[in-house]
Image (cartoon, helix red, strand yellow):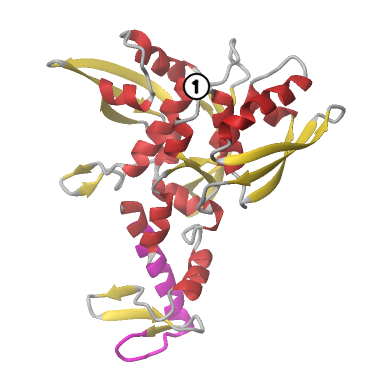
Amino acid sequence: MAKNTNIEFKSFVMKQKPLIDASMDKTQVIKTSYTEKEHDLLNALLYTLQTKTFSQNTLDFWNNQSDIESRTFVFTESDLRKLAKIKDTANDALKDIIRGLRDKRIEIKNFTVTREIDGKIKNVKQHHIGSLIESATFEKIGSSISVKLQLSPVFVLFARKDYNIENGNFALIPYEKERDLSGLVPKKLLEWASKYDGNTMLLRANEEQLEKICNKQPAFAHYKRILNVNFPKLSNLAEFKIITWNSKLKFCEIDVEWKIERPNADKSPFSSVYAFIKHVRKHNVNEILITIDQTEKVLCNDKGVLYNYDTLKIYSTEEAEALWQMIYDYHKKKVSSV
């Protein structure tokens, strides 16, 4: 049941909307966004950590790991070059990109973490200013070079598939199709539009949003030219067209019509227990949802009531509440481990 939802996500990178909307820290002496190569490597690392299974003694790499500590991952230099799409054969090309990610402080607002406060587990809004890659160590091993990347706690959190599924608030970016694009502006446009639901949308962008997409320009009118130049680069993915341009109030409205099929991230059945129950009641009536102690099979009838497969016993409200939580946790974990 849960597997079909995950298959939809497989060719997409889960990217938290606060990360898409993030700005470079205003305290920096040099205020600049990520370069295209830095952007590519960042997304590639997210995608790699979301889709690759790291195992040790059959335990999933993410199990029992803290999301408030830095984590170190080891890659080969050649793998990182492929992830960043580096064709430059110079030895320092990869180092320059990693150094750029390390030295730029990014400001990310309003993402959610789970913390214990006064003995109770609560969801807390967070604000982060800092680097996503904290350090990199290059080591020669035989004829090859390995790179140890120390990723910040926030980056590790956003890379976790289970975190994204549980908290929602992420966009699904078509990973390979974005990598095929040339230029940072069309990639940022694609990510900005991916935050919203619907196959046809009328999106409103203010000056601050246009600044992030096109990089800061000396005059508001320059953004219109930049957008129109870059819209055709996205023609295989979506049709973009400016409908309204208001230079006085400094905003525009852009019509977006998608040409690719996109999963709806915000309607993931795993965004909450309530969303999961609605999904099951609509799509999985009279299917075994969980087997307890290898014998007790639990199903949901066409009225949304949980019952026992063998005895046809209807579970009480109190029993059902605990069972729904158990079933939700089971299927969410199943999706995260695929």
Residue 319 percent across, percent down from the top left: 42, 80
Quarter holding the N terminus? bottom left
Say which residue appears at 45% left-offset and 31% top-offset: 180
Residue 155 percent across, percent down from the top left: 43, 34
Residue 239 position by quadrant: top right
Which contiguous range is marked in magenta?
308-333
Say which residue appears at 31% left-offset and 11% top-offset: 89
Residue 46 position by quadrant: top left
Does 210 appear above or below 290?
A: above
Judged from the image, the secondary structure of the residue bearing numbered disc 1 is: helix
* Residue 127 lies in the magenta stretch: no
Front residue of 296/322: it is 296
- Residue at far left of view: 142
* Residue 317 lies in the magenta stretch: yes
Say which residue appears at 40% left-offset and 12% top-offset: 96
Residue designated by label 1: 36
The kind of residue on which mark 1 rests is: Glu
Front residue of 1/129: it is 1
Residue 302 percent across, percent down from the top left: 48, 83
Front residue of 84/30: it is 84
Is residue 129 visible in this depiction of the protein? yes
